[in-house]
Image (tube, helix red, strand yellow):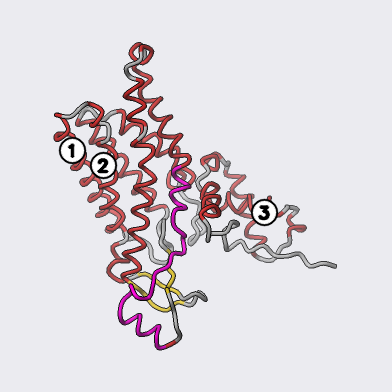
Amino acid sequence: MQTEKRINLEQPRYDQGTFTGRARHFIITTNPFNILATSQQLEDAKAVVERYRKGDTLGALNVSPDQLWQAKHLYDSAYHPDTKEKMFWAGRMSAQVPMNMIITGCMMTFHKTPQGIIFWQWFNQSFNAVVNYTNRSGDEPISKKQLGLSYVGASAGAIGTAMTIKSLVKRFPPIVSRFVPFIAVASANCINIPMMRSRELLEGIPVYDADGNRVGESKKAAEKAIALVLFSRICMAAPGMLTPPFIMHALESKAFMKRMPWLNAPVQIGLVGFFLLFATPLCCALFPQKSSMSINHIEKELQEKLSASSPHDCVYFNKGL
């Protein structure tokens, strides 16, 4: 009797060494329809994954390989990878597109008054804090103090940047002011992400050789990891925040928009959502999760340690999201 080939659920289904494979993985991970799954559907998916990990066969579970992967993707969308606890719905990756389309759309709609700028920039950073807390590491959790400092710093940075730029662009055409939210969000990311991962910058992150053996910690690798994530986050926001202003500027001169000005917010939210639907998974896939770095660019002590053991061209590390 032929033995069933086991499926490795500890690795993504698609090749993470190619952009296409990473894009397919993140399209599934960020699928907003996963947020609609009922508690029973999530519990059923969890049961299938846990039983398979314990050794049950596909036949015993009465599922096909595709159904097993569907259960795994649904399980991953709702349960924390370290604690195995069900995550708060707004902090899940599947909530990124619907939540960000509403928040970003409103930031771009209500950008003309100080009250609108302050409220929506604060709301955006509050949502980011929820996401960061929900997806915190289970082995080395982010402290409440660190979360608080990051939240206050990012909120102050976003609001301060938005208000400052808003006052500077008054002399420019009205369309220029529509780009203030993007600059504020990009500035907040530059504050929030390094602050949230400050321990990595101070202590370094684990680095591995080509065989997966941990060879030490590197602050240089942490700097590169944070830079890659920061670039991805800004690219993720760019299409939905830089393209709709031109479209809305053209639409607002149309007769139907003048007759129904209340359409401004829903149209803008819809436009942002359309771009985020593609930008979120594609920008998450820009760089491999397991990124690499030449040993010539890491700390001298680590270079000497690696040279003494066996020849290495580069080290690998988890860049984060």
Q: Which region is colored magenta?
A: 279-308
Is residue 133 one of those drawn in magenta? no
> In the visual, does 199 lie left or right of 7?
left
Instruction: Identify which residue, 14 or 146, lies in the foreground.
Output: 14
At x 40%, y 25%, the residue is 266
Asked if 27 appears above or below 53 in the picture, the reply is above
- The reply to whether residue 35 is visible in this rendering is yes
Image mark for residue 183:
2
Image mark for residue 304:
none
Q: CA distance from mark 3 to mark 1?
A: 51 Å
First in sequence: mark 3 or mark 1?
Answer: 3
Q: Nearer the viewer, mark 3 or mark 1?
A: 1
Pinpoint residue 175: horizontal percent, then vertical percent.
Answer: 26, 28
Image mark for residue 165:
1
Quadrant assignment, res 298: bottom left
Q: Please, what is the three-letter code of the amino acid marked with disc 3?
A: Leu
At x 42%, y 30%, the residue is 271
Circle 3 is placed at which residue position? 68
Instruction: Give the SS element for disc 1.
Output: helix
> In the visual, does 262 lie left or right of 190?
right
Crowding around mark 1 (Cα neighbors within 10 Å: few <14, some 14 to 19, many 20+) is some
Q: Are marks 1 and 2 in contact (CB under 8 Å)?
A: yes
Q: Are marks 3 and 1 in contact (CB under 8 Å)?
A: no
Pinpoint residue 73: horizontal percent, then vertical percent.
Answer: 58, 51
Q: CA distance from mark 1 to mark 2?
A: 8 Å
Crowding around mark 3 (Cα neighbors within 10 Å: few <14, some 14 to 19, many 20+) is many
Pinpoint residue 315: horizontal percent, then vertical percent.
Answer: 42, 73
